[in-house]
């Protein structure tokens, strides 16, 4: 076991900002980084499976684990529960594994102080785009017109876009800038590692 604890990079941002695409490219670029798999009660979407991109639980299962203090944090977002189980985060950091943890912007408010106190080698990165219309278009392209329009609500997304102040860094991921965003986040990881 390594004496050096792993780096925890918390990635957040509004719906449609490209968090999953950034994580995929970061891991491809550096296979020593692992993604924290969070848990949700939302339904599995096409192309998803248990553990990719979430652990999927029923509302009852999730609430029972909350009662058993199994979660590091949890929130309700758009009528679904999301959280990070302690077994998916702390043991890996203790072993020196670097982790990327994608959380909802609402979750940042709940965990920032606790994370900074418990895991000094952590950094919060806010991924965003220049305007809300680009976010809406991305969600509709990803989910289809009907599902995307149902999933995208301007009010919560506008609120999400204002939460950058809770993070250490803000990275712009406008159209055509994915590789630039990944490079900037890679630089942040390199500068905070160790």
Image (cartoon, helix red, strand yellow):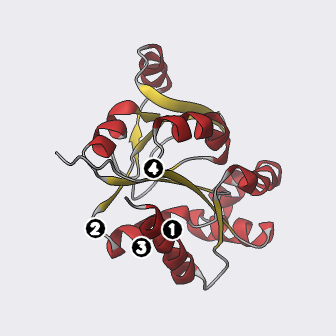
List x then y, in percent, for residue 139.
64, 64
Q: Position of residue 62 (x, y in %)?
A: 46, 25
Q: From what the image shows, is residue 77 above or below residue 163? A: above
1 or 4: tag closer to the N-terminus: 4
Residue 128: name its quadrant: bottom right
Single out the mark in the foreground, 4 or 3.
4
- The residue closer to the viewer here, 119 or 35, is 119
For residue 188, the mark is 1
**Residue 83 left/right relative to 137:** left
**Number of numbered discs on residues:** 4
Q: Tell me the crowding category of disc 2: few under 14, some 14 to 19, or many 20 or more residues within 10 angstroms, Cα based.
A: few
SS category of the residue bearing label 4: loop
Mark with earlier residue (2, 1)? 2
Observer-side mark, 2 or 1, equals 1
Q: Tell me: 134 left or right of 87.
A: right
Q: Residue at x 72, y 56 (%)?
A: 164
Q: Residue 13 at x, y = what percent?
A: 65, 57
Disc nearer the start of the sequence (2/4): 2
Distance between mark 2 and mark 3 Cα atoms: 10 Å
- Residue position for label 2: 31
Quadrant (top left/top right/bottom left/bottom right) for the C terminus: bottom left
């Amino acid at each position: 076991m390594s004496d050096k604890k792993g780096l925890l990079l918390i990635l957040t941002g509004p719906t449609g900002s490209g968090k999953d695409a950034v994580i995929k490219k970061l891991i491809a670029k550096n296979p020593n980084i692992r993604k924290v798999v969070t848990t949700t009660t939302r339904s599995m979407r096409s192309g998803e499976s248990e553990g990719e991109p979430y652990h999927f639980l029923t509302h009852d299962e999730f609430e029972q684990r909350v009662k058993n203090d199994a979660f590091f944090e949890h929130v309700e977002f758009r009528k679904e529960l999301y959280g990070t189980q302690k077994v998916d985060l702390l043991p890996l950091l203790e072993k020196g594994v670097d982790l990327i943890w994608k959380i909802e912007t609402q979750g940042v408010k709940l965990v920032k102080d606790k994370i900074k106190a418990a895991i000094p080698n952590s950094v919060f990165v806010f991924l965003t785009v220049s305007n809300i219309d680009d976010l809406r278009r991305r969600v509709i392209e990803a989910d289809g017109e009907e599902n995307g329009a149902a999933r995208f609500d301007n009010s919560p997304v506008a609120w999400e876009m204002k939460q950058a102040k809770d993070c250490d860094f803000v990275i712009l991921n406008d159209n055509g800038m994915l590789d630039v965003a990944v490079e900037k986040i890679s630089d942040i990881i390199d500068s905070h590692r160790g």
